[in-house]
Image (cartoon, rainbow, N blue to C red):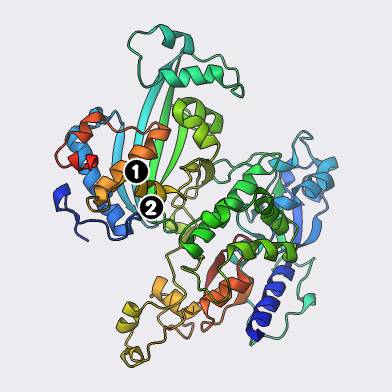
Amino acid sequence: MACSPSLSDQIPLSTFPFLTLQEFECACRAFLNRIHVLGLEGVRWSSARFAQQATGPVLKISRSICKSSIRHYNILPGSVATAEPQVEICEDDPEALIRTPDPSVCLQIDYDIIWSPTYQTPVLYFLLRHSNHPGPLGIDEVYQYLVPDQYKRELQNVGVMGGISFGYHPQSGIPAFFVHPCNTADAMKQIANPQHITPELYLIMWIGIVGSRLSLHLPREIFEMDGLQKLEG
Amino acid sequence: MEQQATLNSIQKGVWDGSLPLQIRLAPSESRIYDQTDPYLIASPRISYLPSLLPRLRAFFSSFLINPDSHPHDGWFSFEGVPLKWHLPLGLLYDLYAGAEPASKAMNDPDDTDWDLDNPDSVLPWRLTVHFSDWPDEELVRLDADGMVMNDAFINSVKEADFLRNGTAKGIMSLSKEDSSGLWKSVQNVDLASFQRISNILLPPPNQPFRNIPIRIFLPLPPDSGSPALKVVQSPIPPFIPPSSMATSQLSLSRSSAAPQPQTMGTTLHSLLPNLFPSRRTPVLAKPVLHGAAVPMSAPIEEVVRCSAYGDGWLYVVIRMMG
């Protein structure tokens, strides 16, 4: 299937609220074109690429984040929106381990967005590690560093998006976290207009609801780009 | 009704199936290296290996160099390959043991076929258990309460449910008691309890599945890089959609409007046309399920209704012929 980079030329989805494999591929390619126009600095990702592997297509995104220690954070004037809420939960959460954080913690997150042949939707797999340290971090660190405050309870209680599990990456076979995809199609139906949705728009909205729960954020600029005003519809 | 009785007896056969295992402690973990006595057990094909860990840990406890390990630190390997514990034992055996599948042409497999003293005999299946050096890059770690296993099982059940019904509402609305009861019934190999709960999830016999939960496992040559297995999955409806009938040169049968049931052969032909050029005869490879070669003509929905694993999936291993 030919993939047009221009959103307005893309045809509507054939199986909405599901996404076919071809539509997923198109969406990934169109989305990457858009990211490259913005530049990786614009999204604060260290890399973003599409790979066609023997086991299927995958959209790979990596980003690094460095967090100052909890005490430093509270007095830094510049740190407003993104990281601060997470800091507070760490202190409020009765189940959180008590840690003495390093002066700054640098983390690398590798996201793999693949297509589920069962659910016919994208699925988010990811691994979190300390920079320059090979071993993956566990679920406690995922909630501590990646899941924003407002989504913590919902994810832990298997809410709308159905929680996080540790399973096997379907392509590499390596253990990895994934966000339960069983409610994705229902969620997409709630928020998207079937008349106007295209593969790329589907992917962007999906990253908006699933990615944002795991600190995979899209920059505001992306929504101001040509062709995405339809998001309002 | 007669058909239902046949399906029930096949299902009972599947649940009764077991494999003789000879499990050795990894020599590097034993105070007497490779002199530790092996543990022998017949284990149900539909069970999961970690269910053996408590008694293996107890059996080997006096030999362990590291006495602080727990049962849930245990993992299994076969010929150096760590075995994925979320796959049922029978599937692991069909995948890795290299055994010739049973078929109609064969005589009843004779129990004396297997030989404890001959390391070249396929049975008992010879596994190694380890209680340290967990292979983090290959296996998801277990926990003391069995929550990780339970979660993996339920996720798998959810996927099967989604394929059968087009939604996962069935399993999501299952009572907590039934949901944990389903996992317990598989752990205890308790077919009666399993049937009671899975009948809540399955579409009734007169209502076809939307899609068949089936995964095809293809062994890959060792030099093809990771992963060592290729898993093929695609939505397979229980009846062949009319559009593909038209292309299958059966133009005459189009006039007879009755939909053609999907068989093992038509399924494999549509997923792997190169390996299965014929829908009726295995030419290059054959499908193996629960240690047996599956007839190509078997209607796929009947196969899944009687021979699925506890999580609702058909896991079919492809074995090359010749």
Instruction: Determine whether, in the image, residue B27 is placed left or right of residue B208.
Output: right
Closer-to-camera residue (A47/B129): A47
- SS at badge 2: loop
Residue shown at the point (41%, 29%) measured from the top left: A108
Mark 1 Cα-neighbour bin, 10 Å: few <14, some 14–19, many ≥20: many
Instruction: Determine whether, in the image, residue B197 is placed left or right of residue A6.
Output: right
Instruction: Determine whether, in the image, residue A167 is placed left or right of residue A62.
Output: right
The answer for how far apart the CA atoms under marks 1 and 2 are is 9 Å
Closer-to-camera residue (A149/B306): A149
Residue shown at the point (28%, 60%) measured from the top left: A14
- Examine the image and state in which quarter residue B11 appears: bottom right
Tell me whether the residue at label 1 lies in contact with that at label 2, contact meaning CB atoms closer than 8 angstroms. Answer: yes
Give residue B159's position: percent from left, percent from top.
Answer: 51, 57
> Is residue B220 something that shows in the picture?
no
Of the numbered discs 1 and 2, the one sitting upstream in the chain is 2
**Which amino acid type corresponds to the residue marked 2 in the rendered image?**
Thr
User: Which residue is tagged 2?
Assistant: A121
Give residue A210's position: percent from left, percent from top.
Answer: 39, 40
Q: Chain of mark 1?
A: A
User: Which residue is tagged 1?
Assistant: A206
Mark 2 Cα-neighbour bin, 10 Å: few <14, some 14–19, many ≥20: many
Residue shown at the point (52%, 31%) measured from the top left: A153
- SS at badge 1: helix
Instruction: Determine whether, in the image, residue A201 is placed left or right of residue B107.
Output: left
